[in-house]
Image (spheres, rainbow, N blue to C red):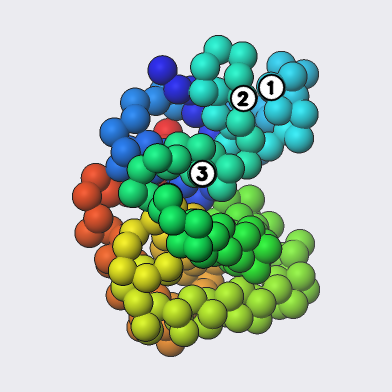
Amino acid sequence: MIQLHGFTGSGNCYKPALAMRQLGIPYQWHEVDILRGESRTPAFLAKNPNGRIPLLEVEPGRYLAESNAMLGYLADGTALLPADRWARAKVYEWLFFEQYSHEPYIATIRFWTTIENSVERHRDRIAEMRPRGHAALAVMERQLAQTPFLTGADYTIADIALFAYTHVAHEGGFDLGPYPAVRNWLGNVMDTPGFVPMQDCCG
């Protein structure tokens, strides 16, 4: 059985967990308390030298890091990752967008606000980063005003990747009120077969 090493409340850990739930892939969850440095122990670093979660153990001794790489691995050969070359590239386009333009701002501010409780220490950085988070949401809004899912009519791992932190963006102080298409898309994702909320599959 696949082993998923993660931290409860992490959107990055939620991504592979949700994909496995929706694909019917059984897995076991192993909590790694990053606030106590458990991802930096020699034992964990032997599995992932980058010292980050999530970490997917696909079979004994075979480890895969990076949440979006996990999504690609898990969804290969399924409807969540199109076989068509162009359609697949569009999915990857959104995965890269999530890691470079969305997660560094929306997820990081949420982490400081809700999980680490370090808003005061990061107040200036939050003020600098928040507009970039809104810029990412605006990009999503423009696309989702045209299509029900990020790459078009079909639900893919691109939607899983962006849903993970967008649906909890309010926990970092991001108001989704100005983004009606994004809010409608959140509902579309939650209506997909096998959808499971974060708290029910991570931890």
Q: Are marks 2 and 1 in contact (CB under 8 Å)?
A: yes
Say few, some or many: other residues with alpha carbon within 10 Å of mark 2 (under 14 / 14 to 19 / 20 or more).
some
Towards the viewer: 34 or 116: 34
> What is the secondary structure assignment of the residue under circle 2?
strand
> What is the secondary structure assignment of the residue under circle 3?
helix
Which mark, residue 47?
1
Towards the viewer: 127 or 151: 151
Towards the viewer: 84 or 192: 84
Q: Quadrant of the C terminus?
A: top left
Which mark, residue 63?
2
Q: Is residue 176 left or right of residue 31?
A: left
- The residue at 61%/14% (across/down) is 61
- For the residues carrying marks 2 and 1, which lies nearer the camera in this image? 2
Mark closer to the chain start, 2 or 1: 1
Q: Can you tell which quarter of the image residue 147 is in?
A: bottom left
The alpha-carbon separation of the residues under discs 2 and 1 comes to 7 Å
Image: 44 above or below 151: above
Which mark, residue 72?
3
* Residue 85: % across, % down: 50, 57
- Amino acid type at mark 2: Tyr
- The residue at 40%/40% (across/down) is 77
Q: Are marks 3 and 1 in contact (CB under 8 Å)?
A: no
Mark closer to the chain start, 3 or 2: 2
